[in-house]
Image: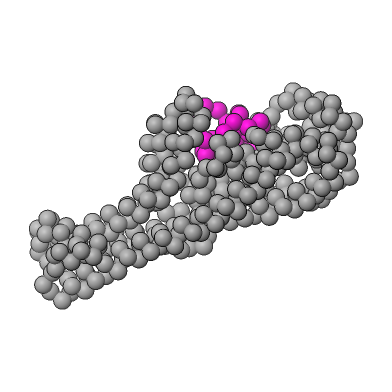
C-alpha cells in the first residue's frame, strides 16, 4: 500500500509541476490571451480579501489607495504561489522516490528551490532532481523580473492617453464635456485627430490587457482617472458626433467606435463577462432618454449645432452605445472605477464576481 502511495505521490508531483510551469508560461511568456487557472485563483482570492477591506462605504480616496495595492500584491502572490507549488511538487517526488519522511522531503525540496544547499541527497538521480528544482526556481524568479518592465511600459502608454483626455474631456472624463469643450475652442474639426489617436489607444489596450491581464487592475496615478471611464467617455463622444451633432460625418469616428467596443468586448471575454455578442439597435442601454435629452440641451446652450430630428438622433446614439454598454458598465464595476458620468455612476454598488470556470460567447463581427 505504501508503495502505491509513493508512486501516486510521484505522479501527483509531476502533474503539479507541469501545471505550475504551464501557468508561468501562459501568464508571462505566451503573447496572447490565455487563462491560467492558478493565476486566476490567486487574483480572485486576493480580490475578495481586498473587497472586504476596501468596502464601498469607505471614502473613495481612501478606498482607491487600498485598491491600488491589489494588482502589485497579486503579482507577488502569484510568484509566491508558483514557488510554493514547485516546492510541494518536488517534495512529493522526493518522498516517492527516496523513501524519505515528509519532513526530510520538505527540507531537500526547500533547500534545492532556494539554492540554500543545506540538505543534499545521496543518489545521483536525486541530485539531478535537485539541480532541476534549483533551475526552475531561478527561472520563475527571472520570469517575474522580466515581466514587470512589460507591465509598466504598457501601463505608461495607457496612462498617457488617460491623462491627456482629462484636458479635453474634464475630470472625470465625459463625452458631452469633450464635445462642448472642442466647440467652445473652435476646434471641432480636430476631433478627427482624437478619433485616430484613440483608435490606436484602444488597439494597444486590447492587446496589452488581454496578454497582460493584471494591467486591468493597475489604477491610475490620479484617483479620479480610470482607463475604463476614459474609454467610455471617448466612445460616447464619438457616438454623439456621428448621431447627434450637426457636423460633417467623419468615418474615422465610426472606426474609433468599432475599435473601442471590440477592445472592451475582448477584455470582457478574458474575464468571462456575460454580454450579448450581437445586440440589436433597439435593445435597452444604461442611459435613459431623459439623460440624453438633458445632455443635448447642455450642448445646445453651449452653441453646439444639434440635428433637428432628436428621435432619430437618440436611435442612432443608442444603436452605437448598445455595442459597448454592457461591457463598459461591467468593467467599471470589475475595476472599481471612480464615479464618472454615463459609465461608473450606474454600475451599481454590487460587486461583480468573475467566474473561475466557464466561458462566454465570442462576439461576432458586425
Colouring scheme applied when the structure was drawn: one colour
Identify the image quadrant of residue 82.
bottom left
Residue 47 place in picture, x, y as percent: 41, 39
Q: Nearer the viewer, residue 341 or 149?
A: 149
Residue 60 place in picture, x, y as percent: 51, 29
Instruction: Give the number of callouts.
Output: 0
Q: Is residue 89 visible?
A: no
Tell whether 115 sits left or right of 165.
left
Identify the image quadrant of residue 288.
top right
Which residue is painted at 43% across and 42% down in the image? Answer: 70
Q: Is residue 193 visible?
A: yes
Which quadrant does the N terminus fall into? bottom left
Q: Which residues are magenta?
A: 324-351
Which residue is painted at 49% across and 26% down in the image? Answer: 59
Please tell me whether residue 364 is drawn above or below residue 327 in the rendered image. Answer: below
Tell whether 143 sits left or right of 124.
right
Residue 305 place in picture, x, y as percent: 88, 34
Q: Nearer the viewer, residue 12 or 170?
A: 170
Q: Which residue sits furthest bottom?
A: 124
Tell whether 351 sits left or right of 101.
right
Residue 10 place in picture, x, y as percent: 20, 63
Which residue is painted at 73% across and 25% down in the image? Answer: 291
Which residue is painted at 75% across and 49% down in the image? Answer: 195
Identify the image quadrant of residue 142.
bottom left
Q: Is residue 339 magenta?
A: yes
Q: Is residue 253 magenta?
A: no
Please tell me whether residue 132 is drawn above or below residue 182 in the rendered image. Answer: below
Amino acid at each position: 500500500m505504501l508503495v502505491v502511495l509513493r508512486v501516486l505521490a510521484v505522479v501527483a508531483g509531476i502533474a503539479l509541476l507541469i501545471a505550475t510551469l504551464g501557468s508561468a508560461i501562459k501568464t508571462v511568456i505566451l503573447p496572447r490571451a490565455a487563462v491560467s487557472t492558478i493565476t486566476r485563483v490567486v487574483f480572485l482570492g486576493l480580490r475578495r480579501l481586498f473587497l472586504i477591506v476596501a468596502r464601498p462605504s469607505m471614502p473613495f480616496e481612501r478606498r482607491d489607495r487600498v485598491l491600488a495595492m491589489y494588482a502589485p500584491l497579486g503579482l507577488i502572490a502569484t510568484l509566491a504561489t508558483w514557488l510554493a507549488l514547485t516546492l510541494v511538487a518536488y517534495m512529493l517526488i522526493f518522498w516517492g522516490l527516496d523513501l524519505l519522511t515528509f519532513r526530510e522531503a520538505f527540507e531537500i525540496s526547500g533547500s534545492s528551490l532556494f539554492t540554500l544547499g543545506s540538505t543534499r541527497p545521496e543518489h545521483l538521480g536525486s541530485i539531478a532532481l535537485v539541480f532541476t528544482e534549483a533551475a526552475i526556481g531561478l527561472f520563475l524568479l527571472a520570469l517575474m523580473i522580466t515581466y514587470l518592465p512589460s507591465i509598466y511600459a504598457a501601463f505608461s502608454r495607457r496612462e498617457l492617453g488617460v491623462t491627456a483626455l482629462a484636458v479635453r474631456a474634464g475630470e472625470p472624463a465625459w463625452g458631452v464635456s469633450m464635445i462642448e469643450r472642442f466647440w467652445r475652442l473652435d476646434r471641432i474639426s480636430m476631433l478627427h485627430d482624437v478619433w485616430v489617436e484613440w483608435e490606436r489607444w484602444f488597439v494597444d489596450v486590447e492587446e496589452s490587457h488581454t496578454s497582460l491581464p493584471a494591467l486591468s487592475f493597475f489604477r491610475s496615478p490620479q484617483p479620479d482617472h480610470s482607463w475604463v471611464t476614459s474609454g467610455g467617455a471617448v466612445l460616447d463622444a464619438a457616438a454623439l458626433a456621428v448621431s447627434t451633432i450637426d457636423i460633417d460625418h467623419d468615418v474615422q469616428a465610426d472606426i474609433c467606435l468599432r475599435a473601442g467596443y471590440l477592445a472592451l468586448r475582448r477584455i470582457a471575454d478574458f474575464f468571462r463577462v456575460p454580454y450579448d455578442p450581437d445586440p440589436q439597435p433597439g435593445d435597452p442601454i444604461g442611459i435613459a432618454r431623459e439623460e440624453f435629452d438633458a445632455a443635448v440641451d447642455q450642448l445646445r446652450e453651449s452653441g453646439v449645432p444639434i440635428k433637428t430630428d432628436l428621435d432619430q438622433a437618440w436611435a442612432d446614439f443608442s444603436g452605437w452605445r448598445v455595442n459597448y454598454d454592457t461591457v463598459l458598465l461591467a468593467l467599471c464595476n470589475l475595476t472599481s472605477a471612480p464615479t464618472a458620468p454615463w459609465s461608473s455612476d450606474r454600475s451599481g454598488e454590487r460587486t461583480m464576481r468573475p467566474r473561475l470556470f466557464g466561458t462566454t460567447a465570442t462576439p461576432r463581427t458586425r
